[in-house]
Amino acid sequence: MEIHKTRVVNDQTVKWISDHWNLENKKGNAEFQFLSIPFDYAVSHRPGTRIGPQMIMDTLNSYSLYCSDKRVSIENTRFVDLGFVDIVHDIKQSYQNIERAVSGISEIVTPIFLGGDHSITDPIIRGMKTRLIDQRFGVIMFDTHFDFREPVIGKEHSGHWLKTLENSIDYESLVLIGIGAPIYSDYYMRELEERGALIKTVYDLRREGRRAVIEQAVNHVLKKSDAIYFTIDIDVFDQAYAPGCSVPNPNGLFPYEVIDSVFEICSSVPTVGMDIVEVSPWLEGSQQFTSHIAANIIINYIAGCVKKSF
Ligand SMILES: [Mn+2]
């Protein structure tokens, strides 16, 4: 007997982000679809990321369609807001709703997922595997944490999605950039590297240089895959720039180290989408610093994809 019968998305009305964004879908131009996932039931530390998607979208709406930093206009790009995934008081059902919503997105558009705690990347990747059945994509993850803990039944946690996906993703097509939180043993580093993941800590990036690291990252993923999916945990940034997150990071990356890297990667190689997670606006008062970082990543991601299509 099916006890829960929920809708996958609680507002199925496809709507535009706002009136000032160009509504014309000029033939041949890219289309991006936003899916908000206000889920924080698996939070590992401080809650509040359920508000993240709304705040990121509000921030995006205060921006223009010109990525002035990179001299790229995104005016002729179509944006669709798919609304919110229906999150219910049942974690498994919510994950199923996320996976079904993701798998239902047309394969010819580029999805941008807004979280939410990082555990949502598990159902997102499962949904992506379903919708892109013929495409091999690897993952570049920006995060200060490994998220590779052993799951404990009944205790969903945002720190084990990379482990729960072990039968679904190829670690040889995985790159972790920005690792640095001092809350792990060497087991996690060793285990992921033995499985084939490329790991670059904050110190590695500073020592080897950002450009060298992203070149290695792209080469690593594309050895066995054709495209890249990004998952960006906002706690990869230094706490000075992203105070609105569950676990502030005192030695995180600077904004350009992530934002410019995302732009450069997607302006040169194929990407299939991205998620941004762990933005928790309630934890930073009225500042919205963290939502601005997230919105800047999105603008740069889109600008990179648009530049690649020139
Ligand atoms: Mn993290």
Image (cartoon, rainbow, N blue to C red):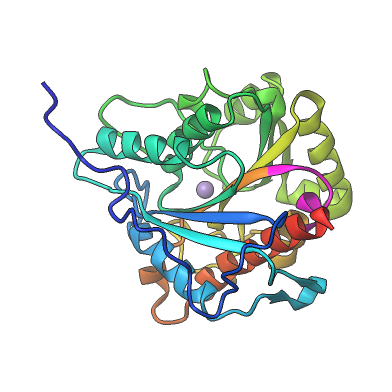
Q: Write the residue at 40% across / 35% down.
A: 99
Residue 3, above or below 235? above
Query: Which residue is nearer to you in this view: 216 or 9?
Result: 9
Is residue 98 toward the left or the right of residue 41 in the image? right
Tell how many labels: 0
Identify the image quadrant of residue 304: bottom right
Q: Write the residue at 55% across / 80% down.
A: 20
Q: Estimate the x, y position of residue 305 in percent, counting from the top left.
A: 74, 55
Q: Quadrant of the N terminus?
A: top left
Q: Estimate the x, y position of residue 110 in percent, counting from the top left.
A: 61, 48
Query: Which residue is nearer to you in this view: 68 or 167?
Result: 68
Instruction: Give the magenta-colored segment's residue range.
Output: 263-271
Identify the image quadrant of residue 258: bottom right
Q: Write the residue at 79% across / 50% down.
A: 265
Q: Estimate the x, y position of residue 130 in percent, counting from the top left.
A: 51, 27
- In reply to whether residue 213 is colored magenta, the answer given is no
Identify the image quadrant of residue 241: bottom right
Is residue 230 toward the left or the right of residue 262 in the image? left
Q: Estimate the x, y position of residue 266 in percent, counting from the top left.
A: 76, 51
Q: Can residue 13 be seen from the camera position used here?
A: yes
Query: Which residue is nearer to you in this view: 30 or 284?
Result: 30
Query: Which residue is nearer to you in this view: 201 or 210?
Result: 210
Residue 85, above or below 296? above
Q: Can residue 142 be seen from the camera position used here?
A: no
Q: Write the residue at 77% across / 23% down.
A: 224
